[in-house]
Amino acid sequence: MRLFVAIDLTPEIRATLAELLGELQPLSTTVRWVKPEGMHVTLKFIGEVPERKLEAICTCLEQAHTAAPVEIEVRGVGFFPNAHRPRVFWVGIEATPNLAELAAQVEIALAALGIPREKRTLVPHLTLGRIRTTPEASSSLERLQKKIATLAERRFGHLTATEFYLYQSKLSPKGAEYKKLVTFPFVRA
């Protein structure tokens, strides 16, 4: 099973991001766009694990908690690693500090099962597209970069998260398909 842990978006945020994608998709044929229904705030990508580990993973995830909900503001756009050599197009996430605390707890809990900890610092974001680099792509990408520069401060919505999910990801030629397996309420006094 290919698994990851994430916080879900509201339907309103998904609708706003769908509008954004509608504006941007005609500008570039070099981007593999993500479907809004598949967007989420990833706390931890677990990867491939045997199904027999599922119960133990759930037991570990039940330990992760915060004293208050996570407040998330979805705003701004950009590229990884940067605008000059873009590979991923993203929308930013600004969150209360307990988002990073929650992600760290998920990492620690799953490490007890031998699931490797992420070496990079958490940079919360929503991936909108992955950029394919081809020699003829430069003019298409340039149009997209100009449009992105005008959207730096655009806001896409706010959500208050009180639960996260264990998802299964199935890869297919049409892209990844996600299925929620388990819900984990995480706010505890």
Image (cartoon, grey):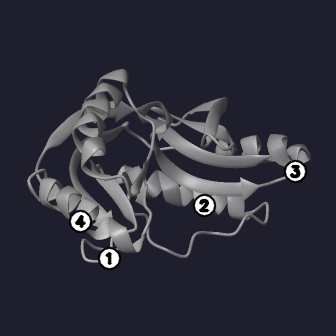
**Which numbered disc, 3 or 2, marks the residue closer to the eye?**
3
Q: Which residue is mark 4?
A: 139
In the picture, the disc for residue 107 is 2
| First reached walking from the N terminus: tag 2 or tag 4 | 2
Where disc 2 sits, the SS reads helix
Which residue matches tag 1? 85
Callout 2 amino acid: Glu
Q: Position of residue 78 (x, y in %)?
A: 25, 60
Between tags 2 and 1, which lies in front?
A: 1
| Mark 4, secondary structure of its residue | helix
Q: Is residue 168 above or below residue 111?
A: above
Q: Are marks 3 and 2 in contact (CB under 8 Å)?
A: no
Q: Is residue 30 left or right of residue 79?
A: right
Tell me if 139 is positioned left or right of 58 in this view: left
Q: Nearer the viewer, mark 1 or mark 3?
A: 1
Question: Depth-wise, is mark 1 or mark 4 nearer the camera?
Answer: 4
Label 1 SS? loop
Q: How many marks?
A: 4
Determine crowd level at label 2: few under 14, some 14-19, many 20+ residues with C-alpha closer than 10 A: many
Amino acid under disc 3: Pro
Give the distance between the C-alpha atoms of the residues marked 1 and 3, in whole angstroms.
37 Å
Badge 2 or badge 1: first in the primary sequence: 1
Label 3: few (<14), some (14–19) or many (≥20) C-alpha neighbours in 10 Å? few
Determine the secondary structure under disc 3. loop
Name the kind of residue labelled 4 in the image: Ser
Q: Is residue 127 visible?
A: yes
Residue 50, which numbered label?
3
